[in-house]
């Protein structure tokens, strides 16, 4: 407890953080964990849920999933499943028994405990774009990711209160050798942000290194680290019907040390999954549940999430499409299934667009609102994603945060309150048919906090906007980004902890980092 | 019947229309009336609905509404209401009795009966932007509306199958004198489109002229015209708490000839209505119901719709904001109230943005999806709106139609079907863990119609997109627009009817048109 209090003092807490980054750069809403109060959109009837469940279970029972991981195969054998080569078939009773062990929600506590997240309980939380190899900005055009660009996007991740967690690398810093990339990026991530972080499941050394760095950054003993989830990993299956060795290995390492694992199959209907959306969802469910069942067998009650990344391809070109009606419905359907299984749900903020223009925003809006409609708990890639995840963009990051902040505001209870003060009969009587509401007390007492305030939207009329340079949204977002970067101060970290982190990175680099033959 | 059949032959029907405009210009979904299968989003509890209802009723009972229309005042007096000067107070029992007369849904049958609309019954229908004084395109920048620009936007209104009705003038043709403007625009509208049209309630002569032109265009006798709704008018109240003379007069003229009236107060919270959203909604409901009660008193069972246009202002500048979280929740709340009263609901597709960029599309997406969430039946301004309704833009029109078409696709039942063919267990078994779904029969039998196909979104990767000119969305929309305009052929109209319309316009112009002192 004392240690926690000390950390809180060092970090300056939430107020300190707001003082440092907000006033100079942008006016934004405070940090909070939004609660999704909307009843989910449910395209599936009870029979539809049963049909997808039965399809998923028959995939697991009759067709099986390939686990290219010897330990997993041994564990499944030990659990009494049918293992033939790498193919594992499991009965629906086993799956149900294992899912019953999984918690419906859990917390993730980063080095700043005020940034603790609850995954589940109707929360909807947002994270930065993860893993694009490329970067695009108005200034640079499309270029490869570098450490500097990665640091820039981590800065945005920290600066925006509506971004709750630092997911994967916001852009791949390809100027850092793959063997030590995780060390440098995690050092940057843990010093530039104080939010929940993630480890890629790309080999034992990487996962262990990242867990160790998170432990050091939190000033935690090994026991303290393992006592509650501090971080998570997210894996994709190799659709169709396959889990790769390092992915399963990484999850097993994480859950055995009390950390969280999210399993998000990437099932593109018509390519790696059936062309029909219910089939693509059923396959995705089967792939995800097979791994989650394994994790619950190994560590009963370990924190797991199920992910959805079901979209469709352009049937003319085979290119993936994102933020489509098909994507929205698949997300909603998976939401119903996740609630059926009692698992927290992860989805994404996505688009196919190559630049932060109109298409980018209608596709992203579609995907973010479908996350709301689906009751999603964790929205990956929610800010900064372009070109189907191949590009990270700072302008897009800022624009997405505007949409996310609107979703956050959308869920504030005062917006739909209907007490006598909100019905405001006396105010209406006072103003009468000839008056104006702006000047009255009822308005004056509320106007500063009554409405959402944007940081990149321009609500001025055309003439005022034109006189000020006729700046389109992407360029305004660029300006916001520059303001943030110019005034950003990283969250505080004790000198000793920073030194310890740096020493760990140096030592592991000397040792050669991690193998790159994965 | 014979006459209808003859008209159908002349018009070429739906297939004929598709043949003429679709293949040359864009690939789009067919004409249909989408059914909103989603359960509405309901931010209000039963107590919340009761509180807003009670607030609205107390406004009507205690504060009253100003009716600046002598006939309305006389009618209210006759009905036993309390009339003092122009102030009318009415009891909730009277309102309830009148609302019980209003149909929950009704049809609107334009000159092409295949374009018949059903307003209500969970349909969600979309119309063009209406009434901006200005026009903006990439080519022209911001310029005033003209007849040529109005004709261009009417062409788009007809060309897109996802646009169901031709609302008000898509841009005000200020190069036509106000006294005869309605004659020229309605001639254009009735010859360039075969969809449901609208009359502005701006004085007796205009309303009567437009009804007469719709009658002529339909080849209808006076009795046939009045036998079923062929068209509608839409009025705003003059918030707070006031109905202007010509608005009420226009509605009375319409309903007495069997046509439809929609009452959509424009209540900007913090300006013309309370700063609290529940208060703004309660006031809007009171204003709308006061007029609808009058119409049901005059013509029991006449087709009426209730509209919502409740948004907030920017409290720094007083400028109206659109597509905000506040706007979304107000729309959803009004949806609950409209269902409570059993009235079809009208809302809008709106934005504050000045150009068709990212902001324009997130604001528009927010407003269109809130219409979906609110169970809205008629979405005004759904395509082409910019600058809070002060600008109409052809590029924005095309971009909005892409979003609308996605909403249409979103509601297709096959998307969420869960029969054995959709679960596709045998396809998953056939492909197995090493295969790809594209080549198999299950995919090949479905791929041409499996997924939404866009007409302006570009799903190619960055390199292909860049090689082709790196064209952003607004410019691609411009190209789509040009293709449509280049290949458009107006829907057929018998020579005799066209001549009769032209003769009516000529005669009414000779008579001086309509007074302009309204």
Image (spheres, coloured by chain):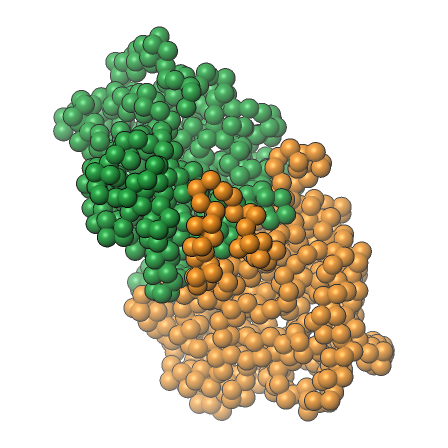
Chain colours: A green, B orange
Query: Residue A169: x percent and y percent?
Result: 43, 28
The residue located at (47%, 52%) in the rendering is B427
Quadrant including the N terminus of chain A: top left
Q: Residue B98 sits in which quadrant?
A: bottom left
Residue B365 in sight: no
Query: Residue B213: x percent and y percent?
Result: 75, 79
A191 or A77: nearer the viewer = A77
Please state if B453 lies on the left or on the right of B88 as rendered.
Answer: right
Please state if A187 lies on the left or on the right of B309 as rendered.
Answer: left
A472 or A1: nearer the viewer = A1
Q: Give the farthest residue toward the top.
A: A510
Please state if B53 lies on the left or on the right of B495 as rendered.
Answer: left
- State how many labels appear: 0
Query: Residue A311: x percent and y percent?
Result: 49, 48
Query: Residue A436: x percent and y percent?
Result: 48, 60
| Image: B184 above or below A397 | below
The residue located at (78%, 61%) in the rendering is B488
B95 or A267: nearer the viewer = A267
Quadrant including the C terminus of chain A: top left
Residue A3 in sight: yes
Q: Give the farthest residue toward the left.
A: A1
The residue located at (74%, 59%) in the rendering is B23
The residue located at (56%, 37%) in the rendering is A387
Q: Residue A5 sits in which quadrant?
A: top left
Q: Residue B127 sits in which quadrant?
A: bottom right
| Image: B510 above or below B23 | below
| Image: A436 above or below B513 | above
């Amino acid at each position: 407890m004392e240690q926690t209090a000390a950390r809180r003092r060092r970090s300056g807490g939430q107020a300190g953080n707001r003082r440092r980054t907000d006033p100079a750069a942008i006016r934004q809403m405070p940090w909070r964990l939004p609660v999704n109060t909307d009843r989910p959109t449910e395209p599936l009837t009870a029979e539809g849920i049963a049909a997808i469940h039965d399809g998923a279970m028959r995939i697991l029972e009759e067709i099986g999933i390939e686990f290219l991981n010897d330990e997993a195969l041994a564990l499944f054998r030990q659990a009494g499943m049918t293992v033939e080569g790498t193919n594992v078939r499991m009965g629906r009773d086993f799956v149900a028994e294992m899912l019953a062990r999984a918690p419906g929600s859990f917390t993730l506590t980063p080095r700043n405990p005020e940034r603790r997240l609850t995954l589940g309980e109707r929360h909807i939380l947002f994270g930065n774009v993860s893993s694009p190899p490329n970067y695009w900005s108005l200034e640079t055009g499309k270029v490869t990711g570098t450490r500097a660009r990665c640091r820039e996007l981590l800065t945005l991740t920290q600066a925006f209160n509506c971004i709750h967690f630092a997911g994967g690398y916001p852009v791949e810093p390809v100027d850092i050798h793959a063997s030590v990339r995780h060390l440098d990026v995690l050092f940057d991530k843990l010093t530039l942000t104080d939010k929940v972080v993630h480890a890629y499941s790309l080999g034992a050394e990487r996962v262990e290194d990242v867990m160790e760095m998170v432990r050091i950054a939190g000033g935690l003993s090994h026991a303290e680290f393992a006592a509650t989830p501090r971080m998570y990993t997210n894996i994709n299956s190799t659709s169709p019907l396959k889990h790769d060795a390092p992915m399963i290995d990484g999850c097993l390492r994480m859950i055995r040390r009390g950390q969280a694992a999210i399993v998000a199959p990437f099932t593109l209907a018509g390519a790696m999954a059936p062309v029909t959306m219910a089939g693509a969802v059923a396959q995705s469910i089967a792939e995800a549940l097979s791994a989650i069942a394994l994790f619950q067998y190994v560590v009963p009650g370990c924190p797991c999430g199920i992910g959805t990344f079901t979209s469709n391809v352009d049937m003319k070109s085979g290119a993936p499409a994102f933020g489509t009606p098909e994507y929205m419905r698949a997300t909603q359907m998976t939401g119903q299934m996740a609630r059926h299984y009692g698992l927290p749900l992860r989805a994404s903020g996505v688009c196919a667009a190559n630049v932060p223009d109109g298409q980018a925003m209608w596709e992203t809006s579609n995907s973010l609102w479908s996350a709301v409609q689906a009751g999603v708990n964790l929205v990956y890639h929610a800010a900064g994603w372009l070109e189907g995840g191949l590009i990270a963009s700072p302008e897009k990051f800022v624009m997405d945060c505007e949409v996310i902040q609107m979703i956050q505001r959308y869920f504030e209870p005062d917006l739909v309150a209907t007490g006598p003060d909100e019905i405001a009969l006396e105010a209406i009587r006072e103003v009468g048919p000839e008056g104006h509401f702006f000047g009255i007390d009822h308005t004056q007492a509320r106007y500063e906090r009554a409405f959402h305030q944007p940081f990149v939207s321009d609500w001025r009329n055309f003439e005022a906007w034109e006189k000020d340079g006729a700046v389109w949204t992407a360029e305004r977002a660029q300006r916001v980004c520059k303001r943030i970067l110019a005034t950003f101060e990283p969250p505080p970290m004790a000198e000793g902890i920073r030194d310890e982190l740096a020493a760990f990175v140096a030592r592991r680099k000397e040792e050669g980092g991690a193998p790159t033959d994965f």
